[in-house]
Image (cartoon, rainbow, N blue to C red):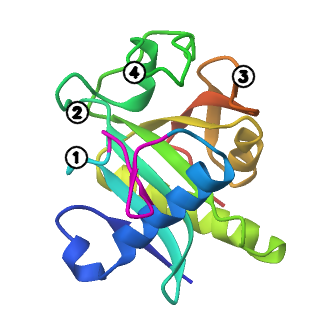
Amino acid sequence: MEVTTLSFTNLHDHGPLFTDLLRARHRTFIEQAHWDLPQADGMEFDQYDTPASRWVAVHDHGRIMAGVRLTPTTHRCGIYSYMIRDAQLGLLDTIPSDLLFEEAPIAEHIWESSRVFVCDDVPANMRMRVQMQLIGQMVTTARELGATSVLGLIPANSPRLARRVGLDCVAAGPVMDFGGSESVCVNISMATKMH
């Protein structure tokens, strides 16, 4: 099993890994979760997949097992900034605007994590290891980018997992139902050490 952080500056070094990641997101979010998201050629993408973002992929022999996208909260592209802030501003139809307790931050030391997933075909006996690899690389990458915290919209049961691996994860908004699954915005401190 390998973990790779992708950026527009290193995509050429990793063959089809990025397109494979977008195809895995398509399977996870469009085919299985039935979310109405942009797609082309079997790949899911949106306005936040820009050169400012980074993507962490857990993969094994060309098979994507898990992924997450990191986006700086300072980034802007047209009318968009980052997903959680744009939802709060009412720019996204599919995410309620009251997802945060406070105003969405804009700061160089805060990044957003989004499109977090573990593929459904990852065997149960490997899921925890895959999740640990994903979280570990997300933390490493965020720290390398200068983040002291990450703001994420994650499944409501994920903060328990984060605490189990040593992450300081605090709810930043109420638990909400997004198309049949409960999610919550969280602040994850990059200052704590993972087990």
Q: Secondary structure at mark 2?
A: loop
Which residue has dot 1 on it?
A: 52
**Residue at image location 54% in from the left, 23% down from the top:** 95
Disc 2/disc 3 C-alpha distance (Å): 26 Å
Mark 2–mark 4 contact, CB under 8 Å? no
Image coordinates of residue 64 in percent, x first then y, are 53, 74
Disc 4/disc 1 C-alpha distance (Å): 16 Å
Which label sits on residue 95?
none
In the picture as drawn, the residue positioned furthest to the right comes out as: 125
Residue type of the residue flagged with mark 2: His
Q: Is residue 43 located in the magenta-colored stretch of the structure?
A: yes
Q: Secondary structure at mark 1?
A: loop
Mark 2–mark 1 contact, CB under 8 Å? yes
Residue in front for this viewpoint, 172 or 84: 84
Which residue has dot 4 on it?
A: 85
Which label sits on residue 75?
2
Residue type of the residue flagged with mark 3: Val
Res 65 quadrant in image: bottom right
Q: Earlier in the sequence, mark 2 or mark 1?
A: 1
Which residue has dot 3 on it?
A: 175
Q: Earlier in the sequence, mark 3 or mark 4?
A: 4
Q: Secondary structure at mark 4?
A: helix
Disc 2/disc 4 C-alpha distance (Å): 11 Å
